[in-house]
Image: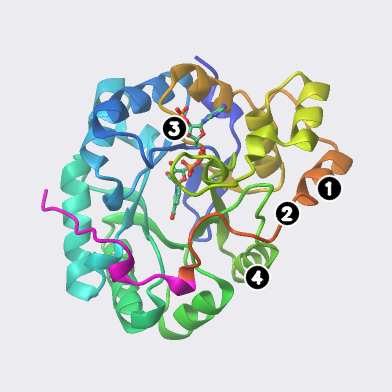
Amino acid sequence: MSDPTSIPTLTLNNGVTMPALGLGVFQSEPQETTAAVEAALATGYRHIDTAAGYGNEAQVGEGIRRSGLERADVFVETKVWVSDYGYEQTLHAFDKSATKLGLEQIDLLILHQPMPQHFERTVQAYGALETLTADGRVRAIGVSNFRPHHLTALLEQTQVVPAVNQVELHPYFTQPDVQAANAEHGILTQAWSPIGGITFYPGWGENRTSALADATIAAIAQAHGKSPAQVMLRWHLQQGRSAIPKSIKPSRIAENFAVTDFTLSDEELARLDALDTGRRGGPDPDAVDPSTWDLSIPEA
Ligand code: NDP
């Protein structure tokens, strides 16, 4: 096992601390998820990122229980899906997620998407998160896929500044405007697809260029005797972001955790920053609507 304390700890805007590196489980099939979580916790990970919409919260909870770790030693993050937005609906969404995870308290609960066409429901959902954190059922709250104007609109209508904004962020899409807005408001930027998963996962469109196959990243990786995935994760950590790489393969889970024994130079960080294409791999948060995804979250 690697040393869990080798991974930097980030302090959120309400004082709660969170390991910067976590295991993501989007597209981890339920039957693969428990083993992936167990492998990650055995490796030294102490942070798991799931979502109601991933359909694998119960298996995440099972992996945590099988690890034998104390509850307080694992930081659990999950997300409320848009079909559960609304004050009462989102309170109930917490109950569904907590029951499936087998946890009384969730460390970080975030809204999975803004719902621009129904922003009042997004605000009501966030109001429920504020209640849940005031009641101690959730230790920190946040958002995901919020662009700067969504943050502005939310902050105008709510009290608690989100602790985290989880957004698509890899060398091909770095969203400097979102990172700046997050920093301005004291919101931690958390990278999804931190090694560019959305640039290569199958079935998501043709003519994609995989960040994992990038020549600049490969050259930097070779110079350090590390892999392209490790270089991208190191870039996130050195720039103060949280990153939640997904894998179901124990060797890659371990590889993605072994990122604290080398340092990228300022020049290398700048070369990675310069790979930004300004083109997102995922959907534009302003173009989505509940009807975009036909997904409702089952009862626990
Ligand atoms: P990642 O950038 O984490 O890439 C994951 C892909 O890379 C998988 O196909 C995985 O395959 C493969 N992989 C993992 N490690 C390595 C490695 N070392 N070398 C080569 N290939 C590797 O993409 P994700 O989109 O999954 O993002 C990570 C997490 O972010 C998600 O799991 C989820 O928790 C979150 N997320 C949040 C979203 C949101 O809207 N808030 C949207 C998308 C993701 P394999 O498993 O076979 O190893």
Give me the C-alpha separation between circle 2 and circle 3: 30 Å
Disc marking residue 184 = 4
Which mark is in front, 1 or 2? 2
Residue range highlighted in magenta: 286-300
Disc marking residue 270 = 1
In the picture of the structure, the residue carrying the numbered disc 2 is 276
Is residue 161 visible from the viewing direction of this image?
no
Give me the C-alpha separation between circle 1 and circle 4: 22 Å
Left or right of 37, for residue 21? right
Looking at the image, is mark 3 or mark 4 earlier in the sequence? 3
Q: Give the main secondary structure of the magenta stretch.
A: loop
Residue type beneath disc 4:
Glu
Q: Residue at 61% of width from left, 23% of height from top?
A: 258
In the picture of the structure, the residue carrying the numbered disc 3 is 46
Left or right of 216, for residue 16? left
Which mark is in front, 1 or 3? 1
Which mark is in front, 4 or 2? 2
Residue type beneath disc 1:
Ala
Q: Residue furthest top?
A: 1
Q: Residue furthest left?
A: 299
Q: Position of residue 55 (x, y in %)?
A: 24, 44
